[in-house]
Each structure stands twice: as C-alpha cells, then as structure tokens.
Image (cartoon, rainbow, N blue to C red):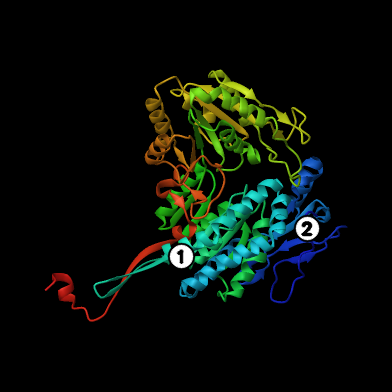
Amino acid sequence: MILDGPAEETASGGSPSEAVAGGRSDAPFRSYKLYIAGKDIEGDGWVYTVSGRSLLEDVFTSVSLKRSLEQDPDSDAASHPYVVGRCAVAGESAIDLASEAAAAAAPGWAAVPLDRRMRLGTLFRDELVRRQDEFIDMLVTEAHPAKLARWELSCLLQIYSEESLGWYRQQMHTEFEHSGRRLIVRRQPDGVVALNPPQNAPLPSAALAVLCLMAGNAVVVRAPRSIALSTMWLLRDVVAPLLDEIGAPPGVLNAVCGNPKQMLDRWVASPLIHDIFYIGGSKEGMEFERRCVAHGKKPILELAGNDGIVVWADADVEHAAEAVTEAFYGSGQICMVPNYVLAHPAVADALIAELESRAERIRPGFPEDDDVLLSPVRRSERFFRLLRQAEENGGEVITGGRRTEVDGTPSETGVFLQPTVVKVTGLARAREYDLVREETFFPLIPVIVPEEAPDGELLDRFIDFVNTNEYGLRNSLWARSGTVIDHFVRRVGNGGLLKVNDSHIGFLPYLPSHGGTGLTGGAFGEANYPMLKTSHVQGVSIARGISPHEAVFGV
C-alpha cells in the first residue's frame, strides 16, 4: 500500500473511512460508503482502485484484478496487495437521496453569514498543508507522477490563498453609501450545485466544491466510478470534518460514486438541482449545456483546451522552451498544458533545437519517482494517426514519435509515448493539421513557423490566429518588447487566462485557475471562479426617511 498509515477505524455514526483488512498482508486499505446527509450510507456494491504502480510493474495482474472485481466486487481479488481501496456505488434511490439532502440543507446554509462560510476556505487550505504528503500519496496511488501531484497541490494552495480568499470576499459583498442610503452589491448562492469531476484529475477538480460551499450552496459530488478513491478521501476525510467544525447543517456536502450517464440524467431532470458543474470533453459538454438550459439549469463547463504559446523574435528562448516543454507533463493529459507554438522565424531554429534537447531529457518511470513527468498512455492509436497526417501535410517530426517502456527503452508495446516535437512550416495552412486545430492529450507539441513578413504584420497574424482558436483556456506570450507585450495583451480576447513571460501552467493568487471561452467554456464561458459562477448578483438599497415621490421625481 502506497498511502501513509492505516485508515481510521469506523466510529459510531460514521467516520472518514472504514479500515478493512481484506486479508492483505501489509496494511488495511481505504473503504468508503456513500456520504449523504452527514451519514455513511450503504451502496449497491463496490468499485475498487488498483495502485498506479501495479499498472507498470505487472500490467497483466493489474488488468486481471480490475476485470475480476468489475465482474464480482466481492471476489477474492479484493484482497490482493495491488488493490488499495474501494468505494460504494450509488443506485437511483441514493442519487435522488443525495439531491434531496442537499436541497433540504441549502436554505439554512445560505443563511449562514458570509464570513463564517469564508472561514471554510482558510481551514481547507491549512488542512491541505498539514496533510500534503497524504494528498500526494493519494494522487500517486491513482498514477499521477509525484512531481505533478505537487503541482496540483500548488494549484489548490493558490486558489485558497489568503489573497484569493480576500478577493472572493470582496466580490461576494460590497457596500456603498449614497444619498442617505446603504447600497449593497452582493452575490447570492444559486442553491444546489452538482459537480461532475473528470477521470484524469478527480481529486483537485472535486476540491473546487469547497468554493461552491463557501458561496452558500449545498453540493452533490459524483466520484468517477472508474477512479473514485481520491475524491471520496478528499470530501469524506478532509472537507466533511471541516464543515462539522464550523457548524454546517448535515446535507450541505454529499459525495456519491456512480455511473456518469445515470447520475447526470437524474441531475438534469431533478427540480432540486440548480447548477451542474460539468468537467469533460467539448463535444459532450456542449450537448450537455443545451440539455441544462432546456431544463432551466445553469451549466458551468470545464471542457477541452487547445492552448497556444507565442514566442517572439526577442524572447528569452531558453525560458520560453522551458514553458513549451510543459506540454509533455502528464504526457499531455492535462487540459491546461500548451498545445501549439507560434515561433517567430528569427528564433524558430534556436527554439526547436532547445526543445529537442529538453524533450529528450523528460523520461518515463514509476509515479512515485521524484523526477518522472510522463504518465502512461493506454490508447495511443490517435497519436500515430496525428503524426502520419502531419508528415503527409509536410510536417517534420523533430524528435520523439515512438512508444517506450517504463525504463525509457523504445518499444512497439510500451505504455509510454516519447515527448514529440513536430515542425509545421507556414501559418496559412497550419489549421489543416489536426494536431494544431484540436486538443491532442498526448506528449506532442507542434511548432508553427510562419512565412517571412514584416514584424507588425506578423504580430497581427499571430494575434488573429490566437483569437480565432475555437478553444480558449490559456494563452502565453514570450517577448521582451514592451510595445509587443502591450499590443498582444490589448488585442487578445480569447481565453480565460493570458500569461506573459511566465510558466504556462503555473498558478497565481487572484487569477483564475480554470475557465475559458469557445469550446472550452461554452456559451457562458469565461475565466471560472467557482465561488462566483455558482452565485448570482443581487443589488440591495436600504433607505431611511426617504420620500418615494422625491426619489423618483426629485421634488
């Protein structure tokens, strides 16, 4: 078992997790029932989590265990040391019960003063710091490289930093004095928020539920059925006790593992659910948005990204290349990594050479190894189709393009993909390449080198290319010229976040960590601050001794 220490024993009335020996020789593993209305509830069976290391160490046994447990959750396979935990599965009645519990708790929680709700954010951040090793171990268990797990933790520590919490507080309630009146502009909670985290990053995505709670909403979270353990750990072991500490009513937080279609369908149909926070692919997400609107729900979408980095003629090429190689982190299976580069012809060759050198130093390995940045890629057929199409269109594979084993040995059956750089010549036809036009989700970065043109014209073409991207999560610029930077910042409207001379994937206080325009956020897409997205603006005027007639006519 990779996690530190045994899980806590079950106490009467429910506890963070059950400790179940299950016949294993090392230590108890984590076991979570459904968490509804402040209680641990039996489900309709179990789903099990197999350690990420096992998928690389003994893939045959790992896959066999998963298949055995899918067919029979109570089989002896559950006692194998590779099996690190289990979560109860919700049926239709439990799904509805969670929505009912949230709806019952929502009015009382919304009436709690804002400052008391805001305290949850501080407590949550402090608890993440205290349990950071456990947080990282949970992600490593689910095959996240430890180095990236620390990056994921850094995201949450910025989202819940004192600076960010202060800014959220200001946006939630601001007061003015005007003509004998006390004027208030405030945000009121929407009611019940249902949150659907993705399979590739369920734990940090589920942590956004705390922001929805701070806004005054009650929340129902679906733990992804295929990888539920870390989500249930976070909500049941970390967040639920904090809500108890500040006196939140039972039912404010509900965490259930279940089938995605079944749960989403019931959420859309339920009159008790007000907002649905959907994290997934763009095609499915845009269709889901239409369903939500048709049923009177607010859809909050976190969909695909296809981020661009512009490297200008005077850029610091070495630092720009550092930012570009973030495209390979997690094997590109992170929505906010760069997906294409626009390189000024004056620095293109130097940038590509630097990228080639850096890409060759990024290696695969077991997730707990400190220097590993690549994740396994189980289905790589599309990766090779993208490369074939790029070469047919005239693109050049500079480095990479092969499968590799966990030790870095090239192999036709390896479960990793080499970091791959492709040179695309010409801006006019660049979007004829699928690897430029679409999010790839592979360790693959195309570097687009445009035709020669005067700098003023070329900058405008770069800006137009960025702005016409169908997706809009993050965009970056590398340049020294203040004139170029000002022009770029003034003109680029696409995306929820714009970084200049900085890490593309790094997080900062005040600025959004998620959200974007186009196919990234849907019709209502923008920078996503979940505390604001799950609330609505309301104006209030409190007057004393005011004549309504004089207020209207001034006499």
In the rendered image, which quarter contains the N terminus?
Answer: bottom right
Identify the residue position indicated by label 1 in the image: 169
Q: Residue 334 placed where, x, y %?
A: 59, 43
Residue 260 at x, y percent in the picture: 58, 52
Q: Which mark is first along the chain, 2 or 1?
A: 2
What residue appears at the point 72 percent right and 57 percent down from the top-left corner?
A: 133
Viewer-side label of 1, 2: 1
Pick the front one: 99 or 465: 465
Left or right, 293 with reference to 438 = left
Residue tagged by mark 2?
74
- Badge 1 marks a residue whose secondary structure is helix
Type of amino acid at the residue the image marks with label 1: Arg
Query: Picture coordinates of residue 435 (x, y %)?
Result: 54, 30
Residue at 40 percent of width and 28 percent of height: 461
Q: Furthest residue to the bottom?
A: 545
Does dot 2 land on a helix, a strand or a loop?
loop
Image x and y of residue 446, in percent: 55, 28
Above or below: residue 472 compared with residue 257: above
Residue 273 visible from this viewpoint: no
Amino acid identity at mark 2: Asp
Left or right of 466: which side holds 434? right
